[in-house]
Image (cartoon, grey):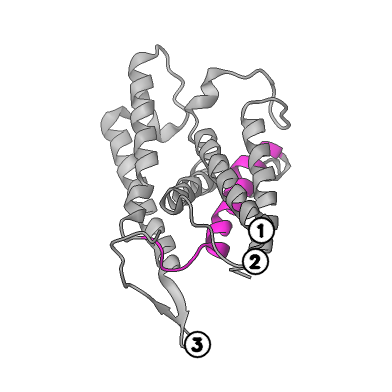
Amino acid sequence: MRKNLVVQLIYRTVLCCVSFLAVLLSFRVFYAGQGGTEPSWTILIYYTNLSNYSVFVCAIVGFAETARRVLGGEREGHQKRWRTFKFMNVVMILVTFLVVIFLLDSPLHADYWLNIGNMSYHCLAPLLFVFDYILFDEKCTLSVFAPLYGVIPPLIYVGYIFLLGACVPDFPYPYFFLNVAELGYGGVTLWVLALLAIFLVLGYLLWLWNRLDKRDGKLRLDFRDILHTRK
């Protein structure tokens, strides 16, 4: 199943549809679960929204490549384009899922599951994208540096929020752990370093999954050519 391009195409069709719904809901074109439907520039300060936009682009690229190959008569293979960028997006959207689950919201409350926004851009789109990587990506293709690249988008986001906070009067900080007005730069830096450490560990666990391959009938970690991403 891992190499079956038709299965990949069906899965990526579903992924693109759910990811598009998440993007649409983030713009409040229609929304269930919260009051108000007017779009605002503040949608662009939320890491959840920005990570879902990036994932949607990456999902469309994966879908387009897979569809082109299936229509061209291929039936087996793996996504070859944007491998490192896709991995970076996997780490980025995993941050979205886990931070919301453990720091910002409670999946134990019924409201979480009844809110179509939460379900789409906090849960379904992230998990579908992560499982696309787990189920279908080719083994032993990512360099050992890929998890380091994966923390670049969160760091850029933190710098972006710091800049807006310094330039916009009464800036509405989107997350408590980035609220410089309350925690100060020292407190925010400690939060950022702690989160980066956690997600570096998660990134390398995902990288190890990429390096776990079956050879001679046994699952083995393959560390050959780990300094380069396979083309």
Quadrant in the picture for residue 118: top right
Is residue 133 in the magenta section? yes
Q: Are marks 2 and 1 in contact (CB under 8 Å)?
A: yes
Query: Of 98 and 6, which appears nearest the observer?
Result: 6
Is residue 66 in the magenta section? no
Q: Kindly report the distance in space between the C-alpha atoms of the residues bearing marks 1 and 3.
A: 29 Å
Residue type at mark 3 is: Gly
Q: Residue at x 53, y 45 (%)?
A: 58
Task: Identify the disc placed on residue 75.
Answer: 2
Residue under pointer 1: 70
Residue type at mark 2 is: Arg
Residue type at mark 1 is: Val
Residue under pointer 3: 217
Quadrant in the picture for residue 110: top right
Query: Of 154 and 187, which appears nearest the observer?
Result: 154
Is any atom of residue 3 visible in this view? Answer: yes
Q: Residue at x 54, y 36 (%)?
A: 53
| Between marks 2 and 3 in the image, the one whose residue lies nearer the viewer | 2
> Which range is magenta?
115-142
Mark 1 or mark 3, earlier in chain:
1
Q: Main secondary structure of the magenta part?
A: helix
Q: Badge 3: how crowded within 10 Å, few (<14), some, or many (20+)?
A: few
Mark 2 or mark 1, earlier in chain:
1
